[in-house]
Image (spheres, coloured by chain):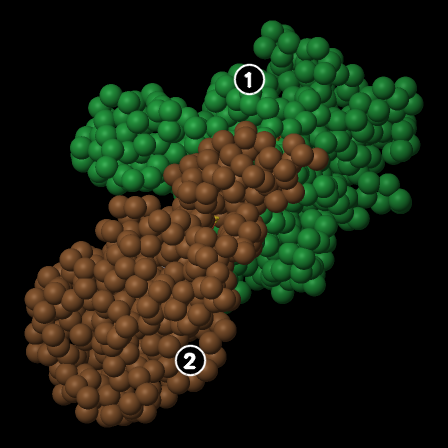
Chain colours: A brown, B green
């Protein structure tokens, strides 16, 4: 199946560091447009239907409007390149192949909301991304696409790189800001939202790498045209990450609304060795584990939500018949035990207890009561945790329990055999 | 003003008020653990969650601001389930040995378990946060197996005291509040103020209990137990025994101590007056002879240790006068022992204090001689309350007693040592009259009163405008010390108390917040105004009598030897 390469269109065709090569292919034209039409940007983004690509899918225009409308002596734009999701590298591919698209998106955001300073928060494990970004920023400054009086306008925009703290939680926007501020990387209570009181207490735009890469496209295509791409309420293309038991794992750009089946069969080539697909984890480590019955679900936020799948950041992990789902759940639960920052009770204590409960199934010591405890505990974690991590970490487990009851029943039954 | 509806009741509040505060206003009591009225909101325990119409998830009421027209439910199946589950998670990390816990009865966690009608059988493996208990400090006992990781201790230690002895370590399930590198507390820069104990909702931090030591001495027929009672105790002990905040109970307190078996009950108020004589003389000398100014008070041992640790190069600003407890200890073991014809070792010197740092002060080598310490045991208000209960005493119905003589007579000036600003006012009441030779028309220096924040005042003593500065809390002290260090603190006299609001907010009292401290503060000034015939230290007849008997003037000879001390550079403590 043919990809729809919009964000990835320049990849391999230009020297990624060179802002001039990027400009020759139409790059920085959107920023030029934004410089002359600063008041129209937020409206265009709103009309385009562009939503955040970092996982939560918040409308970009709306977020920027909040920041624009909050009076403050200083505002910031942060690009979230922490990419802590296990097995995911779409943001890295995007930055390494097309860094100027991201920088252009950030500068447009700065122009739209009145911020003159941007930070890119790069995952600790990506030192070479930092190197490339530093060169790209220097090159853009040299050609006046960034820095003082950009392209002869009255707009200044400077971008700095900050390296991540090596913790998954630092990808959460408020923990990320704490980390940039030099504090312990743990989430802050919202409200106030970053748009009101963000970095150093100032209104701040935080968006994902892929979100920023879409921004120049919205301006160059026009919001009406952008809207026609992909699914109605998740417009645009999306980088989908295929992983797990699949012949051709990788990152692919498609219009949203492509079905999981198309991605699995045509793009990914199905499970290796002719194995049968057992389950799919959608939307990353904290996403739902669904049954292959839902293969025809279109990958967009609304369609996923309607069937109990997770769109998230567009990750799909395929699990074939040979895998032990309980083992998969145990490993995910272990991941969240390790990654909980420990600030709030439900997540700090709850993830560990979820893991213990899953281990009972693994050791065949579980009883039906343990299923009730899992659901009861998970409901409180999702309802009362402080940040997205605790609110979503039980999702794979409760969905596995719900969608694969026979797996958990079998694990209990073996206990009676002993 | 905006309107919010909570459980069907309409509350009118200012925009931005939290749901918790709005609920309290209309009499709805939401359980809280990490919330403390004096602290920044932390929103980490989640026990206070409520349902807000239109919000997808539950929200923590301690942090969530009200908006106009908001509809809140605090008692729904969903809320109840979350609270119970959260409590269950907390208890699965908690030893739950209330019957052996000093916090039982005042414990916020215990109260919440009762309020939530919690009876569920454990569903999780019991796994206390830590088995390790830290008894190294003379003031504070740490028992992390009762810690709920709320962060209230670290907040005061860091934000209010700027000591940073307690921090959050590790992540996730292993998260603990502890000292840096898990050092024993005694080997950190902890100043023993006990404010972390005051902030803790559970028994994870408690006052080092010395009651057994005190009982042993009381029941020892070969020991004469001599007690001194600090000014702040009389406005705190009744509260600690369940009476209203700010109840004054001087007379009953004396009776109770006698009933416990104490042989002589003296008033630290007497040595507070003595402090004014010694420190006042020092101030006058420094002003008249160009000595080091500003002169800074030295009666708060937590503050003294703080100064020794962070500002060792500024120690010459500290008054060399011992604290009132220190002076009294010296009197009891020398002058008074001689009077009784006893050896110092036959006298047991017992201090009743509002302060946990006094326990530490009592161990300082400067407070003793010839191999014995001047103070054998320090009992805080909380511990005294315990002893009174142990002795089956119904405190409320006790008759009034009177202090023993000769050291039972103190002035109102000594009494107000218990409140921030009190030492300064007491000093001014005396120094003014000594320097000018005139009698003060109004002895109330209200400009230096207050109970929060830092205050400054200039008082004209004759032709000399004397500039004073008063603060409590060591973060505030740090700001002032930075000015002293930079040479920009143009005061003559600075009063620093480590605890919020002074000794009435001390770590050894019943659990406090600013509101309670305000009440205790008022009570202190009431004792001064209403119950003290003499309100100036130099006019206390027992004081002049005492100097006459010693045969010296303040600051001289034996007075200097017994009542002054020296300080130690402690900058090598890890900080
Ligand atoms: C535990 C956790 C980890 C997250 N990690 C990332 C991340 O690595 N990258 C990212 O862009 N967003 C991450 N997010 C989402 C961010 O908080 C934030 O919503 C996002 O950066 C906003 O950008 P967007 O609107 O463009 O998606 C994470 C959220 C949570 C709760
Ligand atoms: S939900 Fe988890 S990661 Fe988020 S604040 Fe709470 S403990 Fe930290
Ligand atoms: S801290 Fe509270 S709940 Fe825990 S044992 Fe002590 S009294 Fe009981
Ligand atoms: S006693 Fe005071 S200094 Fe020591 S840890 Fe507690 S709050 Fe900090
Ligand atoms: S020791 Fe007390 S105040 Fe400190 S975190 Fe634990 S429970 Fe909270
Ligand atoms: S009291 Fe509100 S979250 Fe702890």
Closer to the camera in the image, A341 or A13 = A13
Closer to the camera in the image, A324 or A221 = A324
Q: CA distance from mark 1 to mark 2?
A: 64 Å
Callout 1: CB less than 8 Å from ligand 3: no
Using the image, determine if residue B421 lies above or below residue A273. Answer: above
Q: Residue at x 15, y 71 (%)?
A: A218
Q: Chain of mark 2?
A: A
Q: Within 10 Å of the Cα at label 2, are there few (<14), some (14-19), or many (20+) other Cα atoms?
A: some
Closer to the camera in the image, B256 or B318 = B256
**Image depth: mark 1 or mark 2 in front:** 2
Q: Position of residue A268 (x, y in %)?
A: 38, 68
Q: Within 10 Å of the Cα at label 1, are there few (<14), some (14-19), or many (20+) other Cα atoms?
A: few
Using the image, determine if residue A252 lies above or below residue B48. Answer: below
- Residue B242: mark in rendering: 1
Q: Residue at x 59, y 54 (%)?
A: B169
Is residue B41 found left or right of A413 in the rendered image? left
Q: Position of residue A26 (x, y in %)?
A: 17, 86
Q: Is residue B283 visible?
A: no
Using the image, determine if residue A61 lies above or below residue B269. Answer: below
Q: Position of residue B314 (x, y in %)?
A: 60, 62
Q: Position of residue B110 (x, y in %)?
A: 56, 25
Q: Residue at x 33, y 76 (%)?
A: A94
Determine the image quadrant of residue B58: top left
Closer to the camera in the image, A380 or A298 = A298
Q: Chain of mark 1?
A: B
| SS state under label 2 | helix
Report which residue position mark 2 lands on.
Answer: A129
Task: Name the quarter where the C terminus of chain A is drawn.
Answer: top right
């Amino acid at each position: 199946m043919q990809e729809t390469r919009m964000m990835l269109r320049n990849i391999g065709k230009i020297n990624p560091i060179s802002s001039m090569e990027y400009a020759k292919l139409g790059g920085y034209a959107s920023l030029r447009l934004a410089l002359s039409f600063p008041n129209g940007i937020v409206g265009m983004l709103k009309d385009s239907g562009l939503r955040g690509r970092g996982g939560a899918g918040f409308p970009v225009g709306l977020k920027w409007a909040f920041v624009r409308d909050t009076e403050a002596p200083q505002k910031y734009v942060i690009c979230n390149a922490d990419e802590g999701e296990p097995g995911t590298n779409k943001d890295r591919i995007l930055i390494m192949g097309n860094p100027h698209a991201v920088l252009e998106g950030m500068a447009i955001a700065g122009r739209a909301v009145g911020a003159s300073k941007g930070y890119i928060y790069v995952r600790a494990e990506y030192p070479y991304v930092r190197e490339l970004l530093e060169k790209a920023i220097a090159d853009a400054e040299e050609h006046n696409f960034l820095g003082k009086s950009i392209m002869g306008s009255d707009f200044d925009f400077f971008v700095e790189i900050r390296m991540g703290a090596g913790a998954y939680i630092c990808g959460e926007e408020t923990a990320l800001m704490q980390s940039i501020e030099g504090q312990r990387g743990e989430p802050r209570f919202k409200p106030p939202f970053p748009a009101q009181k963000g970095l150093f207490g100032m209104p701040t735009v935080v968006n994902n790498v892929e979100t920023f890469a879409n921004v120049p496209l919205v301006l160059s295509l026009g919001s009406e045209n952008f809207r026609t791409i992909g699914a109605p309420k998740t417009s645009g293309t999306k980088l989908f990450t295929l992983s797990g038991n699949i012949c051709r794992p990788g990152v692919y750009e498609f219009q949203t609304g492509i079905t999981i089946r198309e991605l699995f069969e045509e793009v990914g080539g199905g499970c290796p060795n002719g194995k049968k697909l057992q389950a799919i984890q959608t939307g990353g480590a904290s996403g739902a584990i669904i049954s292959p019955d839902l293969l025809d679900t279109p990958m967009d936020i609304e369609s996923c939500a309607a069937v109990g799948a997770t769109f998230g950041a567009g990750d799909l992990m395929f699990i074939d018949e040979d895998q032990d789902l309980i083992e998969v759940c145990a490993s995910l639960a272990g991941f969240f035990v390790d990654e909980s920052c420990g600030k709030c009770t439900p997540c700090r204590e709850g993830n560990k207890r979820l893991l213990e409960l899953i281990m009972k199934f693994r050791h065949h010591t579980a009883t039906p009561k343990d299923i009730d405890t899992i659901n009861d505990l998970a409901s409180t974690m999702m309802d009362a945790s402080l940040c997205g991590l605790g609110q979503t970490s039980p999702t794979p487990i409760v969905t596995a329990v719900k969608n694969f009851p026979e797996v958990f029943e079998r694990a209990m039954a073996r206990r009676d055999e002993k | 003003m905006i309107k919010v509806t909570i459980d069907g009741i309409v509350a009118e509040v200012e925009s931005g008020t939290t749901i918790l505060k709005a609920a309290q206003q209309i009499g709805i009591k939401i359980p809280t653990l990490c919330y403390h009225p004096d602290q920044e909101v932390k929103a980490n325990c989640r026990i206070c969650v409520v349902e807000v119409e239109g919000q997808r998830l539950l929200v923590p009421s301690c942090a969530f601001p009200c908006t106009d027209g908001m509809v809140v439910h605090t008692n729904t199946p969903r809320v109840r389930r979350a609270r119970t589950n959260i409590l269950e998670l907390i208890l699965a990390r908690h030893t739950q040995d209330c019957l052996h816990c000093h916090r039982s009865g005042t414990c916020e966690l215990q109260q919440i378990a009762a309020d939530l009608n919690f009876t569920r059988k454990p569903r999780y493996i019991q796994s206390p946060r830590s088995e390790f208990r830290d008894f190294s400090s003379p003031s504070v006992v740490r028992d992390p197996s009762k810690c709920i990781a709320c962060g209230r201790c670290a907040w005061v230690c860091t934000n209010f005291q700027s000591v940073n002895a307690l921090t959050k370590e590790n992540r996730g399930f292993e998260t603990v509040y502890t000292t840096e590198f898990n050092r024993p507390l005694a080997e950190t820069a902890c100043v023993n103020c006990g404010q972390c104990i005051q902030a803790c909702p559970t028994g994870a931090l408690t006052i080092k209990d010395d009651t057994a030591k005190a009982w042993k001495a009381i029941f020892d027929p070969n020991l004469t137990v001599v007690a001194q009672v600090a000014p702040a105790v009389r406005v705190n002990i009744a509260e600690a025994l369940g009476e209203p905040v700010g109840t004054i109970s001087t007379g009953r307190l004396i009776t109770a101590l006698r009933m416990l078996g104490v042989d002589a009950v003296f008033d630290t108020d007497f040595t507070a007056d003595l402090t004014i004589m010694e420190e006042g003389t020092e101030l006058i000398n420094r002003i008249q002879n160009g000595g080091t100014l500003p002169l800074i008070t030295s009666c708060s041992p937590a503050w003294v240790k703080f100064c020794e640790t962070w500002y060792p190069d500024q120690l010459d600003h500290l008054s060399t006068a011992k604290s009132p407890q220190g002076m009294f200890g010296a009197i009891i073991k020398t002058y008074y022992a001689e009077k009784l014809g006893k050896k110092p070792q036959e006298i047991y010197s017992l201090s009743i204090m509002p302060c946990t740092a006094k326990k530490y002060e009592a161990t300082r080598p400067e407070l003793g001689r010839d191999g014995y310490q001047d103070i054998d045991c320090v009992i805080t208000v909380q511990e005294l309350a315990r002893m009174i209960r142990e002795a089956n005493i119904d405190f409320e119905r006790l008759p009034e007693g009177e202090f023993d003589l000769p050291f039972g007579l103190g002035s109102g000036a000594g009494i107000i040592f218990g409140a921030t600003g009190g030492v300064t006012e007491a000093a001014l009441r005396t120094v003014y009259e000594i320097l000018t030779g005139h009698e003060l028309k109004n002895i109330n220096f209200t400009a230096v009163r207050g109970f929060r924040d830092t205050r400054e005042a200039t008082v004209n003593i004759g032709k000399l405008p004397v500039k004073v500065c008063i603060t409590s809390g060591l973060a505030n002290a740090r700001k002032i010390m930075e000015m002293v260090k930079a040479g920009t603190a143009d005061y003559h006299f600075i009063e620093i108390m480590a605890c919020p609001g002074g000794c009435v907010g001390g770590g050894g009292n019943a659990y406090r917040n600013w509101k309670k401290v305000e009440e205790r503060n008022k009570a202190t000034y009431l004792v001064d105004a209403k119950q003290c015939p003499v309100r100036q230290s130099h006019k206390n007849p027992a004081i002049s009598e005492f100097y006459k008997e010693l045969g010296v003037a303040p600051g001289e000879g034996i007075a200097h030897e017994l009542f002054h001390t020296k300080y130690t550079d402690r900058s090598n403590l890890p900080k």
